[in-house]
Image (spheres, grey):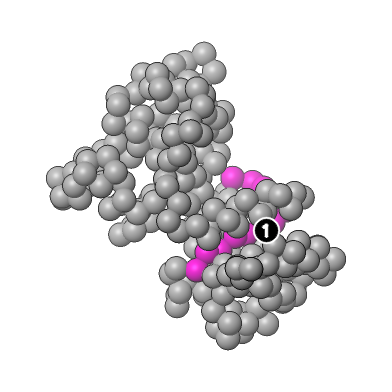
């Protein structure tokens, strides 16, 4: 039996924490459970987990600030926020503080497991063409990848092939950072500086196309890559 990676669960609601812990352990994950930010940060440095499940509202710490402290010394560990905060600015703050994903309470254990598997699957293909349906929902937008159309209410925008391919990459890695180099090699087969500047232009265009839904954002991680937040 294969032992799954170690997960650090920092959640002050004891009952919820126990339910999540038992569910993950039934799938062979090793789970370290903490109920405070102070102990959670201590356990993080002691155990070096593969993933941190972090409640935003802790009794002794702000989850976003805790994530920033983790990111100061570790850029690789996956961080998944659990929170009742659902306003767009809270979601954006979560990603900007270093989070990889954001799950709103209440949530299903099945959805949590899927998100954990995605975060821990570093070698996952950016796009599985078998998953590509005729229409993809991006906030209030409808994206028709095969027809290269982006629709908002009664307005329809025809995308170029490069714009459509870039939006597909962002969509299938939504709420996760895609490295610039990965995008360049996927779309241009070359990470030359000229192509890098072209990528910036296409990102600017997509931001403009998606600007009518304020809950949809493409965040730039300077020197790293981009993340589509929905």
Residue 51 found in image quarter: bottom right
- Which residue does the numbered mark 1 point to in the structure image? 82
**Magenta segment boundaries in residue numbering:** 77-88
Q: Relative to 221, does residue 60 appear above or below in the rendering?
A: below
For the C terminus, which image quadrant? top right
Who's the residue at 77% across and 70% down the image?
A: 12
Determine if the magenta segment contains residue 87: yes
Residue 32 point in image, percent of width and height:
68, 76
Residue 26 point in image, percent of width and height:
74, 64
Who's the residue at 51% across and 49% down the image?
A: 175
Residue 84 point in image, percent of width and height:
72, 53
For the N terminus, which image quadrant? bottom right
Q: Relative to 142, does residue 113 appear above or below in the rendering?
A: below
Determine if the magenta segment contains residue 141: no
Q: Is residue 162 left or right of residue 9?
A: left
Residue 160 point in image, percent of width and height:
30, 24
Who's the residue at 30% across and 59% down the image?
A: 223
Residue 9 found in image quarter: bottom right
Residue 227 in sight from this viewpoint:
no
**Residue sticking out furthest to the right:** 15
**Residue sticking out furthest to the front:** 1
Q: Relative to 169, does residue 56 appear above or below in the rendering?
A: below
Q: Is residue 123 left or right of residue 117?
A: left
Q: Is residue 199 left or right of residue 178?
A: left
Q: Relative to 27, does residue 145 appear above or below in the rendering?
A: above
Residue 32 in sight from this viewpoint:
yes
């Amino acid at each position: 039996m294969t032992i799954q990676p170690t997960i650090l669960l920092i959640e002050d609601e004891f009952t919820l924490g126990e339910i999540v812990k038992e569910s993950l352990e039934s799938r062979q994950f090793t789970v370290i459970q903490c109920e405070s930010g102070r102990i959670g940060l201590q356990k993080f440095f002691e155990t070096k987990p593969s993933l941190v499940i972090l409640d935003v509202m802790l009794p002794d710490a702000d989850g976003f600030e805790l994530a920033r402290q983790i990111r100061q010394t570790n850029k690789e560990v996956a961080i998944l926020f659990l929170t009742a905060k659902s306003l767009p600015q809270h979601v954006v703050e979560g990603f900007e503080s270093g989070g990889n994903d954001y799950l709103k309470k209440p949530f299903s254990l099945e959805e949590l497991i899927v998100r954990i598997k995605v975060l821990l699957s570093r070698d996952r293909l950016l796009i599985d063409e078998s998953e590509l349906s005729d229409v993809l929902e991006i906030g209030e937008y409808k994206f028709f990848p095969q027809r290269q159309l982006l629709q908002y209410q009664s307005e329809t925008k025809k995308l170029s092939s490069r714009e459509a391919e870039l939006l597909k990459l962002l969509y299938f890695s939504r709420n996760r950072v895609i490295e610039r180099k990965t995008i360049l090699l996927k779309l241009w087969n070359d990470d030359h500086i000229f192509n890098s500047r072209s990528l910036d232009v296409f990102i600017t265009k997509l931001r403009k196309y998606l600007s009518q839904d304020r809950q949809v954002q493409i965040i730039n991680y300077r020197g790293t890559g981009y993340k589509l937040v929905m």
